Image (cartoon, helix red, strand yellow):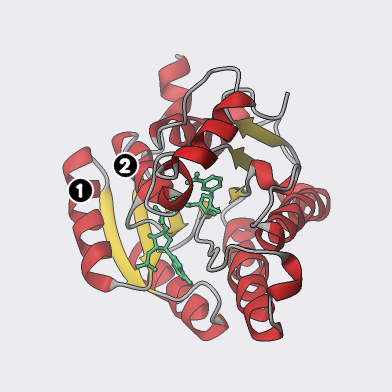
Amino acid sequence: MYIDKLKLKGKTAVITGGSRGIGREIALAFAEMGANVVVAGRKLPDLERAAEDIAAAGGTGLAVAAHAGKTGDLENLVQATVDRFGTIDILVNNAAVNPVFGPIESIDEALFSKMMDVNVKGYLMLARMAMPHMEKAGGGSIINIASVEGFKPSYGTGLYSVTKAAVVMLTKVLALEWAAKKIRVNCIAPGLVRTHFSEFLWKNEEILKLYLEHCPIKRIGQPYEIAGLALFLASELAGYTTGSVFTADGGYLI
Ligand SMILES: NC(=O)c1ccc[n+]([C@@H]2O[C@H](COP(=O)([O-])OP(=O)(O)OC[C@H]3O[C@@H](n4cnc5c(N)ncnc54)[C@H](OP(=O)(O)O)[C@@H]3O)[C@@H](O)[C@H]2O)c1
């Protein structure tokens, strides 16, 4: 009975940053539950490989190249999804960038705009574009990927922390405003997870040691340990859950 409520057969999910790391793992989890999964990112060949993996896992995959910070690309992503599958039931705003490491005073205006465009504005724009389709279909689930950095900053990644704190509040605002439309909006805040994105952190012995000192579970996470939460939030089992932020961080924020 519980397994039936986890199933996503007939549901269509859009996942930004679905070609690798956490986004790809979420795509595979949704696929295993029978969903149609649209993966978006900048590089089409990587997305096409992910779409093949989605099909092999039991779902139907569609690859759409889209830059998460470009509104025109996001409009095209929504249109391509609706053209192929008819609607959007689940949106995972996952793609984010962190192109600098250093003190906040060294970040120039152009970089500030780029990070805000992808990590914050893109999340809002795509949610807004998906909303009418979800409303028409009778409801939906939006999952925003933030970070523990949205709660507790680290030296060197200050602006990234600012963007992730914004994602946490965006989640709550959307959850409040769209509950009447039966659209649930939740957030996952991962700790350090083994992906390409965070390689510069977990491959640096000094930084890894510092992280593990504050991490009671004493290891970094794996993408599937984030995907499981996303699957719950996308499913009927999370029907009473909205505006919530779930950490998956080995206890780092304790
Ligand atoms: N890994 C961690 O330790 C960790 C911790 C906390 C939070 N997070 C969050 O988890 C999410 C996923 O991170 P990850 O670790 O899985 O990263 P990842 O393995 O590097 O994957 C990033 C994905 O995003 C896509 N992407 C990057 N820039 C994009 C853009 N401008 N437009 C569209 N797609 C873009 C990439 O594809 P293309 O390069 O082809 O565009 C790729 O599919 C991010 O929101 C990140 O902030 C990660």
Q: Which mark is residue 53?
A: 1
Image quarter hosting the N terminus? top left
- Disc 2 versus disc 1: distance between alpha carbons? 7 Å
Tag 1: residue type? Asp
Residue under the image location 48 percent in, 47 percent down? 201
Viewed as shown, does residue 88 lie left or right of 170? left
Q: Is residue 144 left or right of residue 38?
A: right
* Residue 101 visible in the displayed image: yes
Work out whether mark 2 precedes mark 1 in sequence or the reverse, and give the earlier one: 2
Residue under the point 66% across and 68% down = 128
Q: Residues within 10 Å of mark 1 (few under 14, many from 20)?
A: some
Q: Position of residue 102 (x, y in %)?
A: 63, 64
Viewer-side residue, 146 vs 87: 146
Q: In front: 50, or 160?
A: 160
Judging depth in this view, the residue of 230 and 95 nearest the camera is 95
Position of 141 compared to 66: left or right? right
Disc 1 is placed on an element classified as helix
* Residue 235 % position (x, y): 52, 34
Kind of residue at disc 2: Leu
| In the image, residue 52 above or below residue 9 | below
